[in-house]
Image: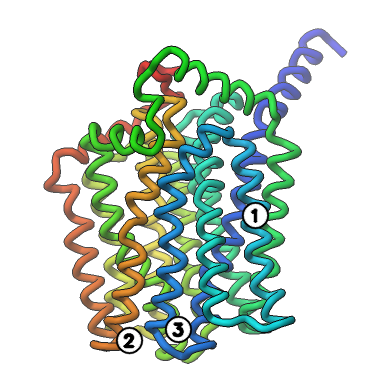
Amino acid sequence: MTTESAASATSTTDAARRRTPLVALFAAQLCSLSGNAIALIAIPIIALTQTGSPLAAGVAGVFATVPLVIGGALGGVLVDRFGYRTSSIVADVASGLTVLAIPVLAATVGLHFGVLLALVFLGGLLDSPGDTAKTVLMPDLADLARVPLARAAGAQSAVQRTATMIGAGIAGALVAIAGPMPALLVDAAGFAVSAFLVVCFVPRRAAASLRQAQDGAVDTGDAASRGGFVAGIRFIARSPLLRSIVLLVTLTNAIDAAGMTVLKPVYATQVLGDPAMLGFMVGCFAAGALTGSAVFAAAGHRYSGRAVFALCFVLAGTPPYLAMALGAPVPVLLPVLVVSGLAAGALNPMIATAMYGVVPDGMRARVFGAMTAGVAASMPLGAFLGGLSVERFGLAPTMLVCAIAYLLLGSSPLVLRSFAGLAAARTPTGVRGANGSPV
């Protein structure tokens, strides 16, 4: 072998070794988030099957979304304290055991609705820190792999969308064949695989170096790195862009929580006449979102800005609710969901890339955790009001109000100057350090 060939082989091996932790992280997210998507389909169906009440499904949605607020508030602090890798592993194992308890109890001593709510609450409480840990670990692994941050953020979003598509498809098929309980067994297995991948392929050495960086930031007296959850809140409050994003996503999340926990399950069950269709509805949206994320990762970040962001937001929410308000049949509804997903796929990468550019290392988990808590704060109320509105006013009027609200909210970046900061997603090439300079 020539010197040049040996050097080339060594370079190829080193590149593969550098990329392995990032690929393993994405694979772990694929498994854990696929499980979450399965639960997202199965739990409302279980609640509707047990009670037959849209309001009960809304109550289940409350118990599924309140933990996102608590987990976001406390999880970011815990993740920063105990480390990204450890937090991810512990959260996955605990979430898997919680999900597994639901079908086990149903098959043995029986599953009371109150016990179901308690397990849903506990599972949601554990999910948020695990998701935060994987999200904030990505920029450093991308830096290790020498992958541009905007591209890695797009790839991570594509993984998240793929997980939703796969999980929803699996859930739809299993609910149609065997019911919602067996679907939760697959959910628990996904968490187990996710924990295994992080244990085996995300090295302790990388996690240790990140921990040292965080501790170093604290030791130097950087006030921004102290204060726990409150520090994350203050950081967001000082940034006009982050404040605007939190407010917009908080309001639209209330609509989406009602849609996912009440409106879409009721539409699939009562209008389409097949609970399993919920899985395929979510899967079609996720398939479109996957394509949108992939397009953003490849080239879309060059066109990020207020106009694109607003257009994507409007298309992501208004058409599906309007179609369902008009009683769209399956051949019309599913393509609408694909198109809406295509627009939605670019939103998270745009937000994440802009955030990575302004949030320093050592603060990421706290800021992302605070943002998770903030944008999830309205979800329990949205889920409850969605169930109450369907019982009081009917499904179609509720859907129409959601479509109009999404149109107005999605258009707001066109008139709010604070969203101009989204243009920063066009050019980031690396992770920014605590002083704001590229690492």
Within 10 Å of disc 2 (Cα), the crowding (few <14, some 14-19, many 20+) is: some
Please tell me whether mark 1 sits on a helix, a strand or a loop.
helix
Q: Which mark is residue 327?
A: 2
Give me the C-alpha separation between circle 3 and circle 1: 31 Å
Instruction: Tell me if label 2 and label 1 are in contact, CB under 8 Å.
Output: no
Residue 354 in view here: no
Taking 69 as reference, is 6 left or right? right
3D distance between C-alphas at marks 3 and 2: 11 Å
| Residue type indicated by callout 1 | Ala
Q: Earlier in the sequence, mark 3 or mark 1?
A: 1
Which residue lies most toward the top here?
3
- Which x, y percent locates residue 13? 75, 24
Give coordinates of residue 185: x percent, y percent.
70, 69
The x, y position of residue 130, in whole percent, is 56, 47
* Residue 342 placement: quadrant: bottom left
Which residue lies at the image location 31% right of the left edge and 38% below the top edge?
233
Q: Which mark is residue 268?
A: 3
> Which residue is located at x 24 percent, y 50 percent?
247
Give the residue displayed 70% in from the left and 30% down from the top: 203
Q: Which mark is residue 94?
A: 1
Nearer the observer, disc 3 or disc 2?
A: 3
- SS at mark 3 in the image: helix
- Nearest the eye: 144 or 376: 376
Which amino acid does the dot numbered 2 rest on? Gly
The vertical placement of 302 against 55, above or below, is above
Quadrant in which residue 242 is drawn: top left
Of all residues, the one furthest to the left in this rendering is 415
